[in-house]
Image (cartoon, rainbow, N blue to C red):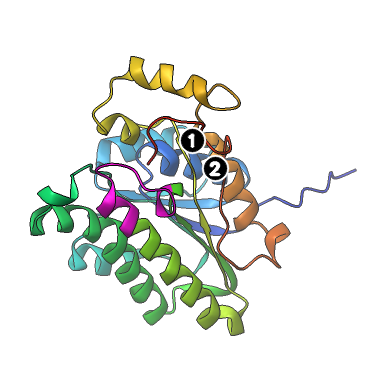
């Protein structure tokens, strides 16, 4: 007897941005394991190939693209099939004190974290590359609501993408397209080591979390699987992923 799996992605075409490392890589691989055909995109071709190599056999595709380039966005969208799911995970982190911010520091974060996902979404909609009743997931951050020193622009970029996603959800509701955000706290990726602390200091800091550890990319991937699946058909709002809830203290993105 066939086992019922409400989280199956069998037969779905799903695009994952930022799929060469960290959370994006974990989501892309998890989607493939759940039966989806995955289109993985990122700037690093070699890392993308590594992501694809960890997927079960299928018609998966890696497309190299720098999403801060409108030309690359146009090329990517032209190559896409009609999507059943989209996970926007590409982005960067940067810690700069407010008094040290300049246009370059702002652009470094705002372009990949806010402008690029919006422009990609616009192109996908304009070229009708997303199916009715599809699911769109943005990887935001707990930092949108919890301030920390030097994190103003990163926090602002994630807060802005949450606001954008809420409006997008309202606009796409007539087509039954779901739009959600996942807002992780601290997740062990290359990104958290860009804040100026060593790995040893981070390992010590994580002990102040209730579960004595930070999250793993796979933890976020499992929530993304739910939101992409038909099990989340009635879920269309801004979802916060409070993984390893509320640090007592310590650095946060």
- In the picture, the quarter occupied by the C terminus is top left
Q: 10 Å neighbourhood of mark 1: few (<14), some, or many (≥20)?
A: many
Picture layout, residue 39 above or below residue 54? below
The answer to whether residue 239 is left or right of residue 123 is right
Query: Which element type, helix, strand or loop, lies under badge 1?
Result: helix
**Residue closest to the eye, 176 or 108:** 108
| Residue at 55% in and 38% down | 246
Picture layout, residue 248 above or below residue 63? above
Please say whether residue 10 is visible from this viewpoint.
no
| Snapshot quadrant of residue 234 | bottom right
Residue 152 belongs to the span the image colors magenta:
yes
Return the x and y of residue 195 as percentages of the image width and height. 27, 33
The alpha-carbon separation of the residues under discs 1 and 2 comes to 6 Å
Circle 1/circle 2 CB separation < 8 Å: yes
Q: 10 Å neighbourhood of mark 2: few (<14), some, or many (≥20)?
A: many
**Residue closest to the eye, 39 or 6:** 6
User: Mark 2 sits on what residue?
Assistant: 221
Query: Which element type, helix, strand or loop, lies under badge 2?
Result: helix
Residue 23 belongs to the span the image colors magenta:
no
**Magenta residues?**
143-156
Return the x and y of residue 44 as percentages of the image width and height. 25, 41
Return the x and y of residue 201 as percentages of the image width and height. 34, 18
| Residue at 28% in and 63% down | 116
Please say whether residue 218 is visible from this viewpoint.
yes
| Snapshot quadrant of residue 252 | top left
User: Mark 1 sits on what residue?
Assistant: 217
């Amino acid at each position: 007897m066939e086992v019922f799996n409400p989280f199956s992605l069998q037969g779905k075409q799903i695009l994952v941005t930022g799929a060469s490392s960290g959370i994006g890589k974990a989501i892309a691989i998890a989607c493939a394991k759940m039966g989806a055909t995955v289109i993985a995109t990122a700037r690093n071709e070699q890392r993308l190939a590594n992501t694809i190599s960890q997927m079960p056999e299928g018609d998966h595709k890696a497309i190299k693209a720098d999403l801060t380039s409108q030309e690359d966005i146009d090329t990517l969208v032209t190559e896409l099939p009609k999507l059943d799911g989209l996970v926007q995970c590409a982005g960067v982190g940067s810690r700069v004190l407010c008094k040290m911010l300049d246009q370059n520091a702002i652009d470094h974060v705002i372009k990949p974290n806010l402008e690029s996902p919006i422009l990609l979404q616009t192109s996908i909609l304009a070229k009708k590359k997303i199916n009715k009743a599809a699911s769109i997931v943005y990887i935001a951050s707990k930092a949108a609501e919890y301030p920390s020193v030097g994190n103003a622009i990163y926090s602002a970029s994630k807060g802005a993408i949450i606001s954008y996603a809420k409006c997008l959800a309202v606009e796409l509701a007539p087509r039954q397209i779901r739009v959600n955000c996942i807002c992780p706290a601290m997740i062990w990726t290359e990104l958290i080591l860009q804040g100026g602390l060593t790995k040893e200091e981070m390992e010590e800091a994580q002990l102040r979390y209730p579960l004595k550890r930070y999250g793993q990319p796979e933890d976020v991937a499992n929530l993304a699987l739910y939101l992409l699946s038909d099990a989340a058909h009635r879920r269309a709002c801004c979802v916060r992923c409070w993984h390893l809830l509320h640090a007592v203290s310590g650095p946060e993105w």
